[in-house]
Amino acid sequence: MKARWMASPAQWVIAAAALSLISNRLGWMVPAVWVAGAGLASIDSFRNGQRLDRKLLLATIAVWAFWTLSFAMTGESWRTFASFEFQRRDGQIFFCLFPLLAVAAAKPSSRQVSWILGAFLAVQGFVALTASCFDLVGKRKLLTGLLFWVDEGPPVANYCGLYFAHNAVGSVQGLGCLVSATLAAFDPEDRRRKFWGILAIPLLWGVLLSRSRGSLIAMGLGLIVLAVLAVRQGRLKVKGLLLIGIVVVLTGSLFGVRLVHRLEELGVAGGTQTWRLDIWKRALGEWYDSPIVGEGLGRFNDLDREWSGIRHVYYVVTRATVVNNAFHAHNSYVHFLAEGGILGLGITVGFWGWIAWKLRGSREPFRVAAFLGVLYLFAISMTEHYMGGGALLLVLSSIVGAAWSLPEPSPTSSRVTSAGGSIPASASPAPSPSPR
């Protein structure tokens, strides 16, 4: 018997909240919808006796608790902490983990996840395809101010899609490409596999068009891991390899030259990589001054900073002019070290490592996609502070929350291969335990 499309108002609101993440230009609307959805989902869970996974809840609270204490150490006003500007900049890690718990509490079915994620990625794919077509025929100016914006980079109209910056759209569409490709390999239904496979193509082009090298490299690494998993589980056959080859040749003919030019910029002296190295050195230097707990949440980009404590042991910024902007260390690992020390880095990276560990070895397509999404986060956080917040983390948190409670496929059922055949259950690996 098929489950109803949406079993409760909470799931409708959560679906709307997930779709609101197609853009980071919606201001207060996004948190308002998420809070409403989380509240309704909590009420439904209480009524139905379906409690949120305790370990997931405690792990998330542990991350929030540490960074709250980190802020408290600075002695900064709690008005600053509660302000919208602080939470959307330096304190993004609080709200960006919120969808993980909200969606996990709503407990959507696999069918619901498929429709919502499909709608979200379809919008992203349509935007990427539209921008690619206009760009390739030399009509980019017609979409300037709509899909092409002058963002924080060079004074040219970069592809930003529905986001404020080219790195934001690159990171989200890179994750979308990886997720779509994963579902194209692991979804048991042939019709859905075709849908996900076709959808991955414009998302790939969107990443190339964004000129976000971090997104491209992280996506490439994720696709390599996906290929290994797909081959090991018999999901990638000759037909699939031929289709991938066609996509690679087509993409290379359309975007190959600009991709080579973009990657060549890595060797240009004084480029963004040189600037990033300088920022990393500064962050590591500030971590060296306070190695255990760092200088305090939000202090990396403040001005007129004054430190208190014992240098090289406990050295926290206790007075400063608060600056709420998008500046960060452009590397989550060194940023966490600077602001949170070894404890902050360990507890936050450890949280995502634990998530990946719980999702590993799954045969449920969405959980495989969520697992690869976390690996993507680990990789892309080497060049931006994505593990600390932003559009990418919101989307990934939603995907992980949706996949968290989905059951493993029955070991007695057959699984469909990418060639359209089936493999008996006896030939399939045993399912890993549910994270619950």
Image (cartoon, rainbow, N blue to C red):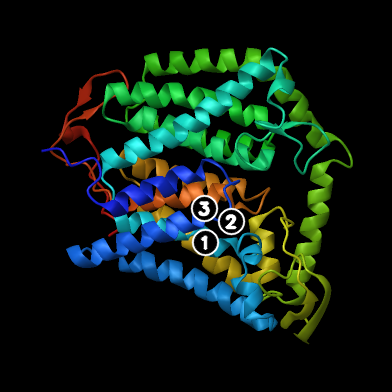
Q: Are the two marked residues, 1 and 2, in contact with CB atoms closer than 8 angstroms?
A: yes
Q: Which of 415 and 178 lies nearest the eye of the viewer?
A: 178
Query: Residue beneath label 2, please?
Result: 389
Q: Which of 27 and 315 lies nearest the eye of the viewer?
A: 27
Q: CA distance from mark 1 to mark 2?
A: 8 Å
Could you tell which of marks 1 and 3 lies nearer the N-terminus?
Answer: 3
| Element carrying mark 2 | loop
Q: CA distance from mark 1 to mark 3?
A: 13 Å
Q: Quadrant of the C terminus?
A: bottom left
Find residue 29 and name its label.
3
Q: Which of 292 and 304 lies nearest the eye of the viewer?
A: 304
Q: Looking at the picture, does residue 139 appear above or below residue 320?
A: above
Residue at 62% in and 17% down: 133
Report whether residue 269 is seen: yes
Could you tell which of marks 1 and 2 lies nearer the N-terminus?
Answer: 1
Q: Is residue 412 left or right of residue 94?
A: left
Report whether residue 49 is seen: no
Identify the amino acid type marked 2: Gly
- Residue 407 placement (x, y as % from top left): 24, 48
Q: Quadrant of the N terminus?
A: top left
Identify the amino acid type marked 3: Met
Q: Are the two marked residues, 3 and 2, in contact with CB atoms closer than 8 angstroms?
A: no
Residue at 24% in and 51% down: 8
- Residue 360 placement (x, y as % from top left): 37, 49
Q: Label 3 neighbourhood size at 10 Å, few (<14), some (14-19), many (20+)?
A: few
Query: Residue beneath label 1, please?
Result: 95
| Element carrying mark 1 | helix
Work out which residue is located at the far bottom of the displayed protein and give it: 309
Q: Is residue 36 left or right of residue 94?
A: left
Q: Which of 88 and 401 lies nearest the eye of the viewer?
A: 88
